[in-house]
Image: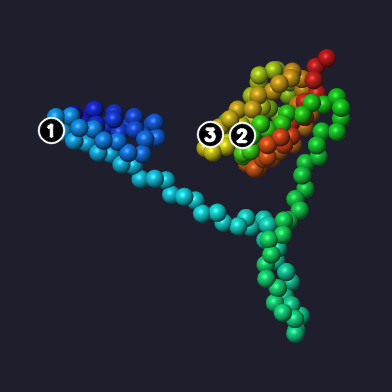
């Protein structure tokens, strides 16, 4: 087995996500073992740690508690004539295909069915979110780089008549 074949074999193993591979051909024996990815350690989210004021003299010191901090959520679509485009997955909202490039759509843009509105990144995969109705973009309800939930409203579209 020459160096080119060995490189192709390694690339194939990486592409398919194979953790361990063994090949024996005549007097040549190859064993490839990939290191497992490190397990990420979950750290407490700093947005959810409340800090209590210093105790007055004679009081016991308060410890930080894990109390959710209220964040203002964008107002849901209230107008019955508007149609909401919701996130089909949990992930991170991106308004453009890459940093520095213009957004897929802006408020006031006319959109068609199947047109890409944004990207939701989930587990290192970029998922294009397409419009399911033709019309005009009235509101953008998520901020670029913001974590979003399943079913969260991303855009409000005024459908064409």
Which element type, helix, strand or loop, lies under badge 3?
Answer: strand
Where's residue 10, x and y in %?
A: 30, 33
Q: Residues within 10 Å of mark 3 (few under 14, many from 20)?
A: few
* Nearer to us in this view, 66 or 92: 66
First along the sequence among labels 1 and 2? 1
What residue appears at the point 24 percent right and 27 percent down from the top-left corner? 5
Q: Give the quarter of the image for residue 19.
A: top left
Which one is nearer the viewer's eye here, 31 or 140?
Answer: 31
Secondary structure state at the residue bearing disc 1: loop
Distance from the alpha carbon under mark 2 to that under mark 3: 8 Å
Q: Nearer the viewer, residue 122 or 115?
A: 122
- Regarding residue 43, the answer to whether it shows in the image is yes
Q: Is residue 118 left or right of residue 24?
A: right
- At 51% from the left and 54% from the top, the residue drawn is 41
Q: Which mark is residue 125?
A: 3
Q: Which mark is residue 27?
A: 1
* 148 in relation to 1, above or below: below
Q: CA distance from mark 1 to mark 2?
A: 50 Å
Which mark is in front, 1 or 2? 1
85 left or right, relative to 37: right
Residue 85 found in image quarter: top right
Front residue of 55 and 117: 55
Which callout, 3 or 1, points to the residue nearer the camera?
1
Query: In what quadrant of the picture does the C terminus appear?
Result: top right
Q: Is residue 158 above or below residue 73?
A: above
Image x and y of residue 56, in percent: 76, 80
Q: Position of residue 17 (x, y in %)?
A: 40, 35
| Image coloring type | rainbow
Neighbours of disc 1 within 10 Å: few (<14), some (14-19), many (20+): few
């Amino acid at each position: 087995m020459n160096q080119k074949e060995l490189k192709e074999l390694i690339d194939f193993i990486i592409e398919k996500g194979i953790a361990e591979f063994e090949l024996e051909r005549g007097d040549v024996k190859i064993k490839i073992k990939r290191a497992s990815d490190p397990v990420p350690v979950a750290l407490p989210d700093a947005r959810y740690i409340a800090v209590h004021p210093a105790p007055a003299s004679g009081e016991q010191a308060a410890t930080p508690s894990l109390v959710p901090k209220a964040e203002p959520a964008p107002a849901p679509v209230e107008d019955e004539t508007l149609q909401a485009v919701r996130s089909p997955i949990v992930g991170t909202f991106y308004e453009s295909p890459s940093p520095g490039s213009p957004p897929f759509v802006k408020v006031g843009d006319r959109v068609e069915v199947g047109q890409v509105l944004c990207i939701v990144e989930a587990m290192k995969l970029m998922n294009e979110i397409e419009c399911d109705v033709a019309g005009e973009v009235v509101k953008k309800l998520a901020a670029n780089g913001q974590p979003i939930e399943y079913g969260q409203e991303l855009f409000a579209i005024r459908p064409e008549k």
